[in-house]
Amino acid sequence: MAKGDFDNLSGKGEPLKKFSGCSYIDPMTHNLNRILIDNGYQPEWILMQKEIKDTTDQLREAVLVSRKKTWESNDISGTETVGPSLQKVHFDAQKEIARTQEINTTLIKNKRNHR
């Protein structure tokens, strides 16, 4: 150094550049992390955090869909209170389905008997 061999290096007189924004991470750790990240490695805790977020998003979407169906069902059920009570009766979808199936079964039996 006394001979001046290092006098013409680039960056002479300037402070050394840090390897990352974190002053508490040593250069070796920074370089290892950079290599891992550049090659697609993700720690298990990050993968778990992503899975939890994805599951939470799916559950929130399911709740919204369920609420929408409930609101639509309430809209249908609420129509019976709009008109006069003697002209409107409660519409029970399950009873209507059972009644339709019963009528269909009866029609099929009658058709078989007439052959």
Image (cartoon, rainbow, N blue to C red):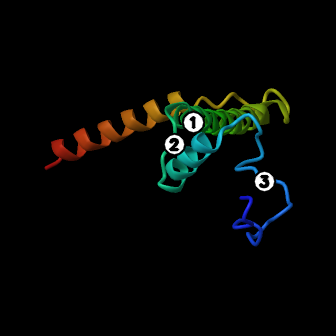
Residue 24's quadrant in the figure? top right
Camera-side residue of 1 and 56 = 1
Disc 2, SS: loop
Q: Going 78% across and 46% down the picture, which residue do you hit?
A: 21
The kind of residue tagged 3 is Leu
Task: Report the disc number at residue 42.
Answer: 2
Q: Kindly report the distance in space between the C-alpha atoms of the residues bearing marks 1 and 2.
A: 6 Å
Q: Position of residue 72 (x, y in %)?
A: 71, 39
Q: Disc 2 vs disc 3: which is toward the camera?
A: 3
Provide the secondary structure element on which disc 1 rests: helix
Cβ–Cβ under 8 Å for marks 1 and 2: yes
Most foreground residue, 25 or 66 = 25
Q: Amino acid at mark 1?
A: Ile
Quarter placement of the N terminus = bottom right
Quadrant of residue 98 within the rendered picture: top left
The reply to whether dot 1 and dot 3 touch (C-beta < 8 Å) is no
| Residue at image coords 26%, 43% | 108
Specify whether 103 is left or right of 54. Answer: left
Q: Out of 56 and 83, give the one closest to the viewer.
A: 56
Residue depicted at 59% across the width and 33% down the height: 49
- Packing grade of label 3 (10 A; few <14, some 14-19, many >=20) is few
Badge 2: residue crowd in 10 Å (few <14, some 14–19, many ≥20):
few
> Residue 53, image x and y in percent?
62, 36
Q: Do the numbered discs 2 and 3 sit on residues whose CB atoms are within 8 Å?
A: no
Choose mark 1 or mark 3, whichever is in front: 3
Badge 2 amino acid: Gln
Name above or below for residue 28 compared with residue 3: above
Identify the disc placed on residue 86.
none
Q: Position of residue 90 (x, y in %)?
A: 68, 28
- Kindly identify which residue carries mark 3: 16
**Which is more N-terminal, label 3 or label 1?**
3
- Residue 3, image quadrant: bottom right
